Structure formats: C-alpha cells, structure tokens
Image (spheres, rainbow, N blue to C red):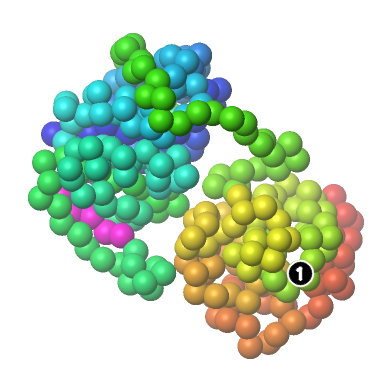
Amino acid sequence: MSILVIAEHNNRELRASTASAVAAASQCGGMVDILVTGYQCGEVAKAAAGIRGVSRILLADGPSLQYGLAENTAEQVLAAASAYTHILAPATTFGKGVLPRVAARLDVEMISEVVGIISSDTFERPVYAGNAIATVQSSDPVKVLSIRPTAFAAVAQDGNAVIENIPAVADTGKAVYVSREVDRTGRPDLSDARVIVAGGQGIGSADNFRLLEALADRLGAAIGASRAAVDAGFVKNDLQIGQTGKIVAPELYFAVGISGAIQHVAGIKDSRTIVAINQDPDAPIFLVADYGVVGDLHELVPQLIDELSELA
C-alpha cells in the first residue's frame, strides 16, 4: 500500500495543513510520499522532506504549476496516481479544487472532510453540520480523501526524505491566471492562527469591524467573520468561517456579535477556548462558548483593548 499526499504551499513556504494530511496518511499504513507542485519551489520540497514518516518527495517544478491552478495540479497528480492506493490533500480551498478533478478522472468516489482513520479503507467524516459522524467504507481501488487539518495534529519536522525530481505537466489551457489579492495586513492566516477575532451581523457595519481589527492587532490574531457578516458586505468572503467557509481550530476564538447559527458553530467547534460577546442573552453561541459576556460590543471591546494595553 502506498499513499500520496499533495502538498499545499505558496512556492515559498509549506503550509501546516500538509503535515496534518501526512498525520492522517500515516494512520492508513504503508509508505507515504509527498507531491510538491509549483515553480521555483525547491525550498518547499526541502521543508516537506523534513516531515516525519515521509519516504519520498516528488518535486514537479515548472511554469505551468506556478499559480497552483487546480486543472494543472490535477493533471500532475494523475501523472503519478498509478503508483498509489491512496491520494490525500488538505480539505482547504486548494485541496477542494484539486481532488474532485482527480477522483472524477480516476472514476472513484471522493471522501471529503475526513476527521478520523479507522483503517486503510474505512474513514470518519462529519455530517449534519458536524452534529453526527458518518463512518464510510470505500471499495474503490484508489481512495481519494480530503483531510480536515484541524482533526489531525501536524507531525514533527524531524524527517529526512529523499527528493526526486519528476517532469512537470504541460499547461492544460483550461484556466488562466489573472491576478491574486494578497492580505498585506500582516495578520496570521485563518487556517493557521492561534487566536482569531471574528465578527457577525451584530457588528452592524463594515466601519465597526475596525474595532475588531484593533483587538486582533493587540492580540496578534487573525480576523474572521460569520456568513451573515459576509453576506451583509461587512468583510470579504475569504474571511468567512463555518460550514460553507473555513474550518478553524485556534487556541482562542472570540465570537463578537455572532448569534451562533449551527453552520458557524460547525466551523469553530474544535477551538480550544471560545469567548462570546453578544447583546442577546439567549443567543445560541453561548451554548458552545467557554466564556460569555452579555453586553454592547461597542463598550466591551474598547474596554478589553484598554485592559490588554495595560498588560503589555
């Protein structure tokens, strides 16, 4: 049995989600390889080679793979797929773009959002917004799995895998890179952040999100939002947390003005500590919060910022 993990990176740094996917792969049993696709991404391959339990790094380095387009990346995966019984990737925007294409071309079922490995062919995944866990057994010759990074602790960086260069596939021509907007605030990425400050529709406006930004900057935290806040136009949709957004598991999660809809809770339930601030004492968010404060966020958040400033 052999397993291929698709690395997630930006051509400079390896994302921690890759090490979480390797943790899941190691529970399946068998040899684990990592496929690094990109352009001038040798440093990423070296970082991947340091992940514990990995046998080989397959490095496909070429201009067609520079921007991580799902169409080209999937072709690269398929070029190597015949040697593997399992193909894994993080259940992130990257993995969700690549794996369905791979599964369709291999004519196998994709098993998404895996949170538990029972055996090499049996897996656990959440259903009903995380309120139940389904056990899924696959008889397909190749298991294609997206791994929820928050469910598997990243393995240590003490390995010494061999790096093997493989030919990069040609550009499929099915998609064209246009541009990319990069967050230049200096805040952590939501998927990796230890602390997250998130706002909901109760924030009231986009201008009021500046309060949360000030709190986040004081804590060195990432900024997030509920779907209601995104739909209201308060923030961009790449900050959305929840069942239809990003799944997070920080050490500390501030839910400010968030009612606690089940879809949002599904995305934060693995957080170590949840702090809720809401004017409604009956808001569902208080049912999952470790600490809750009932009050006006426009009074409480500035007070919290002042207290943190005094402690600095």
Q: Quadrant of residue 261?
A: bottom right
- Magenta stretch prevailing secondary structure: strand
Q: Residue at x 36, y 17 (%)?
A: 170
Residue, x 62% and y 54% (percent of image)? 237
Image point (89%, 61%), residue name: 306
Compared to 159, does 213 lie above or below?
below
* Left or right of 87, for residue 38: right
* Residue 162 coordinates in the image, percent (x, y): 32, 15
Q: Which one is nearer the viewer's eye here, 169 or 275?
A: 169
Residue furthest to the front? 173
Q: Which residue is mark 1?
A: 203
Query: Residue 164, relative to residue 145: is it above or below?
Result: above
Residue 27 horizontal side relative to residue 11, left or right: left
Q: Position of residue 25 (x, y in %)?
A: 28, 40
Task: Find out whether residue 124 is within the magenta segment.
Answer: yes
Residue 74 placement: quadrant: top left
Q: Is residue 197 visible?
A: no
Magenta stretch, residue numbers: 119-125
Residue 73 seen from this side: yes
Q: How many marks?
A: 1
Place of residue 294 in the rendered image (x, y in percent of width and height, measured from the top left): 74, 82
Which quarter shows the N terminus?
top left
Q: Residues within 10 Å of mark 1 (few under 14, many from 20)?
A: many
Give SS at disc 1.
helix
Q: Residue at x 45, y 52 (%)?
A: 150
**Is 107 part of what is drawn in magenta?**
no
136 horizontally vs 11: left or right: left
In the rendered image, the vertical position of residue 213 relative to residue 266, given as above or below: above
Along the line of sight, which residue is nearer the eye, 257 or 93? Answer: 93
Foreground of the two, 97 or 23: 97
Q: Residue type at mark 1: give it.
A: Ile
Residue 236, horizontal then vertical, whole percent: 67, 52
